[in-house]
Amino acid sequence: MTENFADRLMDAIARKKAPVTIGIDPVYSKLPPGLVGQAGLNREADLESSLDAVLEFSRRVIRLVAPYVPAVKINSAYFERYLWEGIEGYYQLIQEAAERDLIVIADVKRGDVGHTAEAYAAAHLADPDLAGADDLVGPDAVTVNGYLGADALDPFLKVCREDGKGVFVLVRTSNPGAAEFQNTMTAEGQTIAEHMAQLVAKWGVADGLVGKNGLSSVGAVVAPRDVEQAKRIRQILNNSMLLVPGFGAQGLGAAEVAACFKPGGTGAIVNASRSVIFAYEQPEYKQQFGDQWEPAIEKACQDFVAQIRQVAGM
């Protein structure tokens, strides 16, 4: 029987004692001079050169953080901008992370209806079933847009049941403009984000989606911009894992993300991207490591893990 995604994620978190994931969101202009100064990686305007630099940086980040974290979140947009070669590189990074026994969350935010949703689920979540791709794996989970309704999610949930994969449905996102829509009050006195949380809770307890630990393979993306709202969403989504963005560079700290954990410090995985992968730009790490960018990333990852361990009481 295929193991439930939430069970696998919880086991991975327990092994590392780290309810965190590192976001792989590379930007060429922010890459360390010691890397982009190398021959073949030093031409930002050249497709091949800049993509090679971005992929080399991403591979090294994955290798640096793998001993400390259970998961990485790879944002497809940062690779799609490099066209077909970038998409190939994105799937190569999924293989790289999987080979290092990391849970891979693909940040793709897909959502559509009918056959298009089926195609997205096959392309972004399911393991490839085409001849010649037998040795490749898809990500363990993806982010999806649930605002199109249940039929848009059904193909993804089918993959969750059959292949032990997971989804994180957008409920309360971290961008400042999210409040314009997601904080709008419904006639029932809830925000739209809270209404979406209720739908996710209902979708998540359908047959074949809840694991042995009582958590569903249907999770939610919840940024605790409003701590009280985050606490309400946490109560609504009692059976769901929360993927928590916004920590670090986007301004959220330990006090805010604490609202997303269940009693006992479970039920959430906190993401940090820029604050870790570009740590060598921050004065505290620059002072410690100078131009050595890899030790700066490793130390920032360790510091991030320590902060969230304290929040979760691990």
Image (cartoon, rainbow, N blue to C red):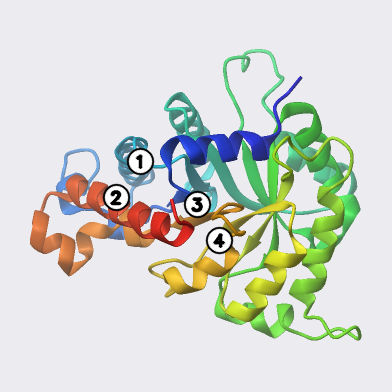
Residue type, numbered disc 2: Gln
Position in image of residue 106 (x %, y %) = 58, 44
Position in image of residue 152 (x %, y %) = 85, 52
Please tell me how crowded label 3 is: few (under 14), some (14-19), or many (20+) other residues with Cα within 10 Å.
few
For marks 4 and 2, give the CA distance.
18 Å
Q: Is residue 273 visible?
A: no
Q: Is residue 18 visible?
A: yes
Q: Which residue is mark 3?
A: 81
Q: Which residue is mark 2?
A: 302
Residue shown at 57% from the left, 72% from the top: 224
- Observer-nearest residue: 138 or 76? 138
Q: Earlier in the sequence, mark 1 or mark 2?
A: 1
Residue shown at 70% from the left, 27% from the top: 3
For marks 1 and 2, give the CA distance.
7 Å
Q: Which residue is mark 4?
A: 244
Residue type, numbered disc 1: Tyr
For marks 3 and 4, give the CA distance.
25 Å
- Observer-nearest residue: 187 or 82? 187
Residue type, numbered disc 4: Val
Q: Which residue is mark 1?
A: 68
